[in-house]
Amino acid sequence: MDQAPSKRLLFWAPSKMSCRIAQIHKVSSHSEVYEPCDDSFALVDALLADRTNLLEHKPTLCLELGCGSGYVITSLALMLGELPGVHYIATDVNLHAVRVTRETLQAHNVHADVIATDLASGLDSRLAGLVDVIVVNPPYVPTPDDEVGQEGITSAWAGGVDGRAVIDRILPVVDKLLSDRGWFYMVTLTSNNPLQICRQMKAGGYASRIVVQRSTEEESLHIIKFWRDSGDPMCKKETATLKKTSSGKVMDSVLSQIHRLPFWKKVESND
């Protein structure tokens, strides 16, 4: 089955740090598994852009929800490879994706526990409050609701009427799993109303910022980073950095960034 056209919006150039991410020719594949595409590359580029902070953060447990081909979790393991004692977990409801991710990890000589489950079902109680980094490229494409949760590759992109059906299930899972110093990176599309997502997360005690934003004339992807606005030193550093702009004005969340983006006027009018 072909990839969803709406997930092929952007153009991508290989990163200058490609030696620290998964190599496309080593990524395994299957006709029912979503292959690395523009959104995958944008998410990995966001992690690369934040790599210095991630190394300083020294996570002990990293998790990808919906690992697909394994490109993202493999890239994360490679870019943090110099850190000792980091454990990686990846989940996917698609059994073909579980196998493909294991093959991709093996091809790059890195390890993660790859588990066949819906999001973190069966793991959430054991991992509650323990995960330092969560990465998600969710099914965000607006589709009819009856396409959500179908078997095979459709589950990788079908997000319901506004692309939020699965995202809205992910957010409380993330809130339960993240440690007090946890960081959460997620791909969103303009149609998903990221402004509303950030408001919702802010109400739960999270700060946020856009790490990567890429656009075409028709759409825009944002890779948003969320963290608990807590007393953890790295979280304090992240919040302090966010509050500094060239004009000295304060931005306490991604809301200010989104308002400045020209495409947002159309979406906000429907908020």
Image: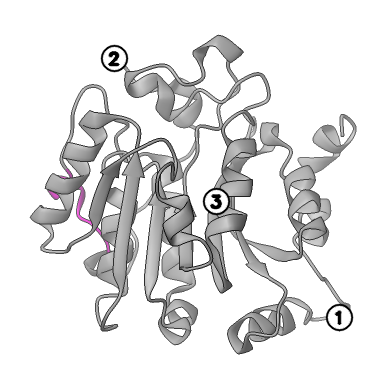
The residue that label 2 is drawn on is 1
Q: Residues within 10 Å of mark 3 (few under 14, many from 20)?
A: some
Tell me the residue that label 3 is attached to. 186
Task: Estimate the spatial distance between the alpha carbons at disc 3 and disc 2, rounded to whole Å.
Answer: 25 Å
Amino acid tagged 3? Met
Q: Residue at x 62, y 89 (%)?
A: 233
The amino acid type of the residue labelled 1 equals: Ser
Nearer to the camera, 89 or 195 = 89
Label whose residue precedes the other's in the sequence (1 or 3) = 3
What percent of the width, then of the height, locates residue 195? 78, 47
Please name which of the two marks, 1 or 2, marks the residue nearer to the observer. 2
- Left/right of residue 12 with respect to residue 220 in the rendered view: left
Which residue position is annotated with label 1?
Answer: 247
Residue 33 occupies quadrant:
top left
Mark 3 element type: strand
Looking at the rendering, the stretch of residues picked out in magenta corresponds to: 21-27
Image quadrant in which you'd find residue 255: bottom right
The image quadrant where one finds the C terminus is: top right
Identify the element where label 2 is drawn.
Answer: loop
Residue closer to the observer: 155 or 245: 155
Answer above or below: position of 83 versus 203.
below
Instruction: Work out whether residue 171 or residue 25 is closer to the camera in this orientation and state it.
Output: 171
Q: Position of residue 164 (x, y in %)?
A: 64, 31
Residue 240, given in percent of the width and then of the height, sits at: 73, 84
Q: Amino acid at mark 2?
A: Met
Sequence-first disc among 1 and 2: 2
Q: Is residue 262 visible?
A: no
Q: Residue at x 19, y 54 (%)?
A: 23
Q: Is residue 228 left or right of residue 66?
A: right
x and y percentages locating residue 185 in the rendered image: 53, 58
Can residue 237 be seen in this snapshot? yes
Between marks 1 and 2, how big is the CA–CA gap?
50 Å
